[in-house]
Image: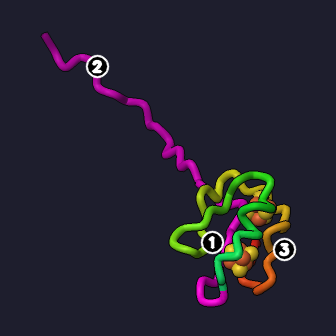
Amino acid sequence: MGLGSLFKRGKKQEKQEVTDDCHIDINAENCDGCEKCSIACPNNVLILVDGLSSVRDAQVCKSCKVCMAICPKDCITVN
Ligand code: SF4
Ligand code: SF4
């Protein structure tokens, strides 16, 4: 029994950068929960939670900005 094999591999830190392709900002103060954004989003990114639009899964957002365009209150910003 020995400690023969020490890991010598200088393993590079593979930093998997989770880059937010899509940054969705929802101004909850202006949102009236009309649900137009979540209905219009082709990727089901948005969901209504407690009467406010919320991001369900930003990773599936394709930044099409349909939600921005449809929101009557101008509360969504997609970068
Ligand atoms: S930008 Fe497009 S895909 Fe992303 S949340 Fe808005 S409607 Fe959905
Ligand atoms: S469309 Fe605008 S006001 Fe309507 S739920 Fe979405 S963010 Fe809120």
9 to 18, vertically: above or below: above
Some atom of ligand 2 lies within 8 Å of the CB belonging to the residue at label 1: yes
Q: Quadrant of the C terminus?
A: bottom right
Q: Mark 1 points at which residue?
A: 53
Tell me the amino acid under the disc marked 3: Ile
The label shown at residue 70 is 3
On screen, residue 29 above or below 62: below
Q: Is mark 3 within 8 Å of ligand 2?
A: yes
Q: Is residue 72 magenta?
A: no
Magenta region: 1-30
Element on which disc 2 rests? loop
What's the colour scheme?
rainbow
Q: Classify 10 Å Cα crowding around label 1: few (below 14), some (14-19), many (20 and above).
A: many
Q: Is mark 1 on a helix, strand or loop?
A: strand
Mark 3 is surrounded, within 10 Å at the Cα level, by few (under 14), some (14 to 19) or many (20 or more) other residues, namely: some
Type of amino acid under label 1? Ser
Q: How far apart are marks 1 and 2 (CA)?
A: 54 Å
> Between marks 1 and 3, how big is the CA–CA gap?
13 Å
Residue for badge 2: 5
Camera sees residue 76: no
Q: Please name the predominant secondary structure of the magenta segment in the image.
A: loop
Q: Which residue, as the protein is rendered here, is positioned at the far top?
A: 1
Q: What residue type is labelled 2?
A: Ser
Determine if the magenta segment contains residue 17: yes
